[in-house]
Image (cartoon, rainbow, N blue to C red):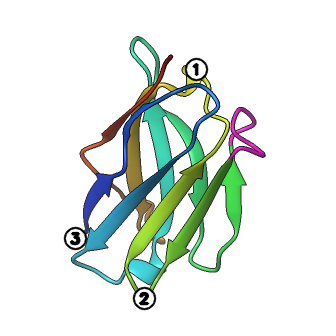
């Protein structure tokens, strides 16, 4: 069992930056593949970025070069650093932990990111 708590969302102007944090508890954090998803109103939830236990990363094309995912296994925390934010980045961002090998996913409660002038 894993509990995930996101923080760091908010309102930011276009071109601004935010850093999201996801604190995990309840299990061995280092063995999970961690990811950030987002869901905008009227749209399906989409994978934004992921990071394996070994530090390999994945990014959606829409955020490459602007977002960076990282993890601190000692602190049981995963981060999403977001730069050059655009209005289309507005969404609820969810932290996800994928258990291996069965692929079961745990979800956080989500944090709102709004990019608007």
Residue behind mark 1: 88
Q: CA distance from mark 3 to mark 2?
A: 18 Å
Q: CA distance from mark 1 to mark 3?
A: 33 Å
Q: Residue at x 58, y 67 (%)?
A: 70
Q: Answer left or right for 13 relative to 92.
A: right
Q: What secondary structure is found at the residue carrying circle 1? A: helix
User: Where residue 76 sits in the image (x, y, percent)?
Assistant: 37, 78
Give whichever of 112, 2 is nearer the camera: 112
Quadrant of the image for the N terminus? Answer: bottom left
Local crowd at mark 3 within 10 Å, few (<14), some, or many (≥20)?
few
Q: Residue at x 48, y 42 (%)?
A: 37
Q: What secondary structure is found at the residue carrying circle 3? A: loop
Among numbered discs 1 and 3, the one appearing first in the sequence: 3
The circle drawn on residue 74 is 2
Over which residues does the magenta segment extend?
Answer: 60-66
User: Where residue 10 sits in the image (x, y, percent)?
Assistant: 36, 36
Considering the whole magenta stretch, tell me its main secondary structure. loop
Q: Answer left or right for 77 relative to 49.
A: left
Q: What secondary structure is found at the residue carrying circle 2? A: loop
Residue at far top of view: 42
Residue at far bottom of view: 74
Residue behind mark 3: 1
User: Where residue 103 sits in the image (x, y, percent)?
Assistant: 45, 60
Give whichever of 18, 53 is nearer the camera: 18
Residue 41 vertical position relative to residue 85 in the rendered view, above or below? above
Q: CA distance from mark 2 to mark 1?
A: 33 Å
The circle drawn on residue 55 is none
Check residue 58 for magenta coloring.
Answer: no
Q: Residue at x 37, y 42 (%)?
A: 9
């Amino acid at each position: 069992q894993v509990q995930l708590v996101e923080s760091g969302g908010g309102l930011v102007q276009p071109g601004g930056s935010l850093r999201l944090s996801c604190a995990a508890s309840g299990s061995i954090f280092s063995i999970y593949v961690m990811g950030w998803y987002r869901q905008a109103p009227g749209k399906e939830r989409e994978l934004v970025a992921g990071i394996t236990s070994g530090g390999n990363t994945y990014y959606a094309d829409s955020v490459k070069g602007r977002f960076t995912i990282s993890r601190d296994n000692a602190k049981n925390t995963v981060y999403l650093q977001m730069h050059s934010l655009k209005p289309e980045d507005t969404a609820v961002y969810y932290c996800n932990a994928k258990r291996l090998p069965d692929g079961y996913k745990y979800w956080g409660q989500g944090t709102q990111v709004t990019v608007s002038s």
